[in-house]
């Protein structure tokens, strides 16, 4: 809040809030979600999303896959549904 | 975060996250399909496309994502019938792709036995004697995204994207504390 003069009195007026108009929230379609997941798997590990899922579900994850990358991909699993 | 409908609950959950992240840049949050309405399923949000981090000042990058679930608490809850609960989170700040600090909680992960919230400290900030910590899971309290964003601004010098960042983080953090179940 700030104050301004009004008819000789100080009155409180709301301070203008800062609105970030360029930030976005986007919900993907199933197809877009699959593409996102596949792209992320290729970027993180150099394998397709399908290959990552197959290895993960078979508990056959190679030792040389970075754990952090696997964790980041697991967070994205709902995109692969 | 509660709401009268699933979309309202998701909006009440996502908007404060977006506002918090916007303190360090333009936040593009991407939701998995059905994330605004499918009750009882696990959904995700991620920054950008899930593999492109948000660019920060000073050559730093920020990656964040969560898995969450919409819960139906019953008609008797009225306008707070639906609630969104976080199931997992990962926040990470890196410099030239090298890890500085990460806060993780991923109890649903199939590939990790670590189900408590923890930190990872990147080798890039450690001396040679401390390299063992690079793969360590350091126990931590639950970390809110607001705490992580505040850390980036106050402790590692990320330039804020808006003048009122501190008040903004305080506002959204208090909402989180109000509705957090643990």
Image: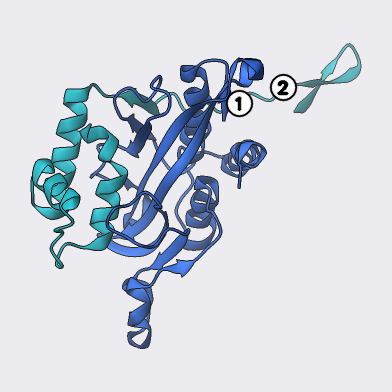
Chain colours: A cyan, B blue
**Dot 2, how many residues are within 10 Å of its Cα: few (below 14), some (14-19), or many (20+)?**
few
Residue B176 relative to residue B118: left or right: right
Q: Residue furthest bottom?
A: B129
Q: Which residue is mark 1?
A: A17
What residue is drawn where x is 37% and y is 55%? B92
**Dot 1, how many residues are within 10 Å of its Cα: few (below 14), some (14-19), or many (20+)?**
few
Mark number, residue B75:
none
- Residue A3 position within the rendered picture, expressed as x and y whole percent measured from the top left: 80, 25
Vertically, is B156 above or below A51?
Answer: below
Vertically, is B91 above or below B124?
Answer: above
> Spatial distance from mark 1 to mark 2, Cα to Cα?
8 Å
Front residue of B83 and B169: B83
Q: Image quadrant of residue B94?
A: bottom left
Identify the image quadrant of the C terminus of chain A.
Answer: top left
Query: Is disc 1 in contact with disc 2, using a CB cutoff of under 8 Å?
Result: yes
Q: Which residue is mark 2?
A: A14
Which chain's residue wears label 2? A
Q: Image quadrant of residue A21?
A: top left
Which chain's residue wears label 1? A
């Amino acid at each position: 809040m700030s104050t301004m003069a009004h008819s000789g009195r100080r009155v409180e007026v709301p301070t203008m809030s800062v609105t970030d108009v360029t930030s976005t929230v986007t919900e993907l379609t199933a197809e877009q979600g699959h593409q996102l997941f596949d792209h992320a798997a290729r970027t993180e590990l150099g394998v397709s999303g399908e290959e990552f899922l197959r290895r993960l579900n078979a508990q056959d994850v190679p030792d040389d896959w970075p754990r952090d990358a696997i964790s980041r991909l697991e967070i994205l699993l709902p995109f692969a549904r | 975060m509660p709401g009268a409908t699933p979309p309202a609950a998701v909006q009440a959950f996502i908007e404060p996250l977006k506002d918090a992240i916007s303190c360090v840049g333009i936040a593009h949050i991407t939701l998995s399909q059905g994330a605004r309405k499918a009750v009882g399923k696990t959904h995700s949000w991620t920054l950008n496309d899930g593999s492109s981090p948000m660019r920060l000042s000073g050559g730093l990058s920020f990656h964040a994502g969560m898995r969450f679930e919409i819960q139906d608490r019953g008609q008797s809850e009225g306008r707070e019938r639906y609630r969104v609960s976080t199931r997992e989170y990962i926040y990470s700040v890196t410099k030239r792709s090298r890890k500085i600090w990460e806060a993780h909680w991923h109890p649903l992960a199939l590939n990790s036995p670590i189900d408590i919230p923890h930190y990872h400290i990147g080798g890039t900030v450690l001396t040679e004697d401390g390299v063992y910590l690079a793969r360590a899971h350091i126990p931590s309290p639950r970390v809110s995204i607001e705490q992580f964003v505040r850390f980036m601004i106050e402790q590692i010098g990320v330039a804020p994207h808006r003048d009122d960042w501190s008040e903004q983080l305080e506002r959204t953090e208090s909402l989180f504390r109000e509705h957090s179940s643990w």
